[in-house]
Amino acid sequence: MDESSSSKRAGFGTEQLLGEELSGLSIKDLQNLENQLEMSLKGVHMKKEHILTEEIKELKMKGHLVHQENIELHKKINIVRQENAELQKKVYGPGGINELNRVSHITHGISNEYDLHAPINLQLSQPQNQKNDEPNVMKLG
């Protein structure tokens, strides 16, 4: 196979694209094969970069949405804390036992409205029985 006939071929075979069966190719054919492979590789890199860029955009958008949802949830938590403090004031009344400590502890997180790493401490407690003049006696009969 001479140089002119091999360089006039329309394309290279799969084996040649894989770097095999190159012994019959001329310098010009090898340069053409190298150029074709470089162009193919550039196309692959461009496609890969495009896909990665799109994935990054999508992940950034999802991250932003999650961040916004997190802020909204923290706002709701602070509203619940405020409501809880108000309910405790109603239950324990002004001057109730340790009321000041409970309310300040509950409302402490309200000032941290946008602190996404603030600890959340929830506490359940039974309301204290109020003293009645009449004892609770069950009447039979």
Image (cartoon, rainbow, N blue to C red):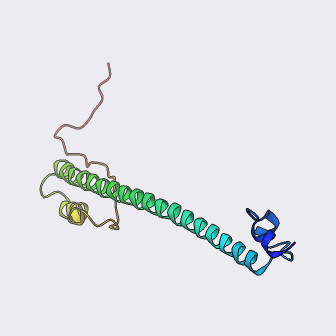
Q: Quadrant of residue 59?
A: bottom left
Where is residue 51 shown, x and y percent of the image?
Answer: 52, 60
Residue 9 makes an appearance in the image: yes
Residue 18 is at least partly visible in this image: no
User: Which residue is at the front of the view, 88 or 27?
Assistant: 27
Which residue does the image show at 20% across and 54% down from the upper left? 82
Of all residues, the one furthest to the bottom in this rendering is 27
Say which residue appears at 26% left-offset and 51% top-offset. Answer: 80
Q: Where is residue 85 shown, x and y percent of the image?
A: 21, 54
- Drawn side of residue 103 relative to residue 27, left or right: left
Q: In the figure, is residue 78 to the left or right of 55? A: left
Q: Residue 137 location in percent, x, y?
A: 28, 32
Quarter the N terminus occupies: bottom right
Judge left or right: residue 48 versus residue 78: right
Q: Residue lying farthest left?
A: 94
Horizontal and vertical percent for residue 123? Answer: 33, 56
Asked where in the image residue 66 lies, by quadrant, the reply is bottom left
Total count of labels = 0
